[in-house]
Amino acid sequence: MSKTKKSSGVKKVVLAYSGGLDTSVILKWLQDTYGCEVVTFTADLGQGEELDPARAKALKFGVRKQNIFIDDLREEFVRDFVFPMFRCNTIYEGEYLLGTSIARPLIAKRLVEIAKKTGADAISHGATGKGNDQVRFELGAYALMPNVKVIAPWREWDLLSREKLMAYAETHGIPVDMKHKKGGSPYSMDANLLHISYEGRHLENPAAEAEEAMWRWTVPPEKAPNKAEYLDLEFRRGDLVAIDGRKMKAHELLATLNQLGGRHGIGRLDLVENRYVGMKSRGCYETPGGTILLKAHRAIESVCLDREVAHLKDDLMPRYASLIYNGYWWSPERRALQALIDHTQQNVNGWVRLKLYKGNVILVGRDSKTDSLFDPTIATFEDDAGAYDQRDAGGFIKLNALRMRIAANRARPQKR
């Protein structure tokens, strides 16, 4: 790789920095290749890892103290991104709860905010040219800072193998964890409060079963407790506000659901998804809290939402999911859909009772004292005292059958 510095006009760049091998190499590469000042940004999204080492590594490579940002974004992440997404009961390709996808617009937002605050003229990230994250980061950045320059090292450098990354790290004195020296962690992982994803190595064969030792948040369902656990969830305007009567902040609620679901083996997923760039990719996911939340939210909607509004939401959901998956969170069409979705949630208030048992989330009750559209006097199979006139159904059926009756009469053989 050439050591000649690029004449790019970039004086300062904000790097999305984890402190791991890839982004540590990127930090040094940016200094060597662009000759620019580097600002590091590390987001705490509830990944459960110690973030202070990222600060120490950045300082070691000459990043000034005032240019190191380590931000606790857990509450904003759940309150302003995860909860709005779940108001739409969002699932991509029938299964995926979008745990990675929904974190990227927040990271892009904060990258841009830091760039503006520090006077940086570029941002950089460690997403590869094969993945979705490059699209999500950059679409978000351009939507929020149209003239920002984006530096994507994986699309520029020749360090396209683990061996080359290791050699570069050793040449430049970048600390390499023993796990990398001994062959590396077997999976590429992404974690936040909504999920953990696992990709690569053993999982690149879609026929191979995931190793049990891989999973971090959930026990195998067969080893979950033999006794079911009941759970009461309270919703206000479509958002979870309390668990078993205890009100908490948004990120605390999701963390609690993760813990409860994890010990009952809830939320594992093995998926082959269609990436934005055109390839198929196999990944495994743990989303215990999200799996519980989705079940509960649909349950409270079932008694509070008008039928046609509920059906409209179901029609729009795949489009909304694709917008998030493909990086269009900050687009006008996503914002427009969100306004409609949020409007439908004004009367989604009440409680849901669930039973957690060996990988299953079982609905056992739901009600809304203020907004339920369920009328037992009409729905009953007993004497409804005239609340519903069953004779009305005859005319309704005949009107809806009229077009089919006309077509059937036309299709009859003509008598000769």
Image: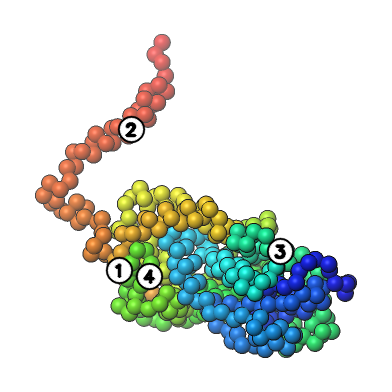
Q: Residue 11 in the image: x percent, y percent?
A: 75, 72
Name the residue beneath numbered marker 1: 351
Q: Are marks 4 and 1 in contact (CB under 8 Å)?
A: no
Disc nearer the start of the sequence (4/1): 4
Q: Which residue is drawn at 37% across and 78% down?
A: 248
Q: Residue at x 58, y 67 (%)?
A: 109
What's the residue type where badge 2 is placed?
Ala
Secondary element type, mark 2: helix
Name the front one of labels 3 and 1.
Answer: 3
What's the residue type where badge 4 is placed?
Leu
Name the residue beneath numbered marker 2: 401
Q: Residue at x 51, y 65 (%)?
A: 97
Q: Do the residues labelled 4 and 2 touch (CB within 8 Å)?
A: no
Disc nearer the start of the sequence (3/2): 3
Name the front one of labels 3 and 2.
Answer: 3
Report how far apart the C-alphas of labels 4 and 1 lie in the structure: 9 Å
Q: Residue 399 in the image: x percent, y percent?
A: 30, 32
Q: Are marks 3 and 2 in contact (CB under 8 Å)?
A: no
Name the front one of labels 2 and 1.
Answer: 1
Q: Do the residues labelled 2 and 1 touch (CB within 8 Å)?
A: no
Side of 261 where 164 appears, left or right: right
Name the residue beneath numbered marker 4: 240
Look at the picture and state if 7 lies above or below 260: above
Disc nearer the start of the sequence (4/2): 4
What's the residue type where badge 1 is placed?
Trp
The mark found on residue 143 in the picture is none
Q: Quadrant of the N terminus?
A: bottom right
Corner quadrant of residue 181:
bottom right
244 vs 156, nearest the viewer: 156
